[in-house]
Amino acid sequence: MSGVEVEPAVAADLFGDRLDLARAFTDALAREGEERGLIGPLELPRLWTRHILNSAIAAPLFSGSVADIGSGAGLPGVVLAIARPDVQWTLVEPMERRVTWLNEQVSALGLDNVEVLRARAEEVRRPQGFDIVTARAVSALRTLIPITAPLVRSGGELILLKGMNVANEIDAAEKQIKKFRLSGVRVEILGEGVLEETTRVVRAVVRG
């Protein structure tokens, strides 16, 4: 497809024997993403670099049961579910058309480790909590922490994919970090020397 970024060689390292599934998902997103309001028109030339690999590089951090809040186009949730079939993923998304897309992709890719939930984060009811809650490009930490931290079991973890401004976001979220009893709050940079664009994640343990 014209205008779509050529698959970088490192994709094979990140996805291994799941690379064909990653290709199928990326192709579907390239074909339908703009038309269905999932990605902007400027994203096609950097679809692999900025979105697929940017999400996949975080895959080793996850285990157990994970909720992806505001899953949208499936970034990072579908990508991570492809890369980590041993982890149980719940993709939480309030918008019907995006939920339809997510269900289509889960079915087409045969991802039996994924549940799609149409809901806002505040509406999710999981008494035992999730081992990990993640989100990518949803909102600033001070508004993201109050909707994600309550979903994590005591001793579980937040792993939030953030942008370049993450240090300032942590400073601005000082009250929320204390209120929701987050400890070990830190930024990790993933993919240095591996990816063209590194990924920044905020990690924190939730002491419920």
Image: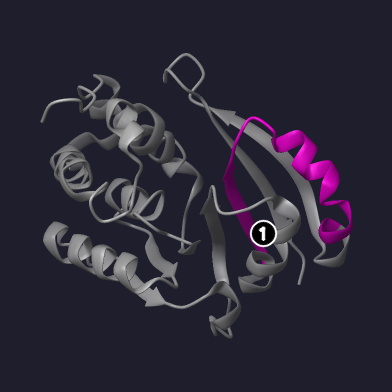
Q: Quadrant of residue 16?
A: top left
Q: Is residue 198 visible?
A: yes
Give the residue at x 46% y 62%. Answer: 64
Q: Nearer the viewer, residue 164 or 32?
A: 32
Q: Label 1: which residue?
A: 144
Give the residue at x 71% y 52%. Answer: 141
Q: Is residue 69 magenta?
A: no
Q: In the image as oriented, which residue stretches furthest toward the top? A: 193
142 up-or-down from 192: above or below: below
Q: Position of residue 107 (x, y in %)?
A: 16, 66
Give the residue at x 76% y 35%. Answer: 167
Q: Nearer the viewer, residue 35 or 59?
A: 35
Q: Nearer the viewer, residue 27 or 203?
A: 27
166 up-or-down from 151: above or below: above
Q: Is residue 154 visible?
A: no
Q: Position of residue 54 (x, y in %)?
A: 43, 34
Q: Position of residue 73 (x, y in %)?
A: 34, 54
Give the residue at x 56% y 54%. Answer: 138
55 up-or-down from 95: above or below: above
Q: Is residue 159 magenta?
A: yes
Specify the quadrant that holds the N terminus: top left
Q: Is residue 54 left or right of residue 122?
A: left
Residue range of the region highlighted in magenta in the rendering: 155-177
- Total numbered labels placed on residues in the image: 1
Q: Is residue 197 left or right of residue 48?
A: right
Q: Residues within 10 Å of mark 1 (few under 14, many from 20)?
A: some
Q: Is residue 190 left or right of residue 173?
A: left
Disc 1 element: helix
Q: Amino acid at mark 1?
A: Leu
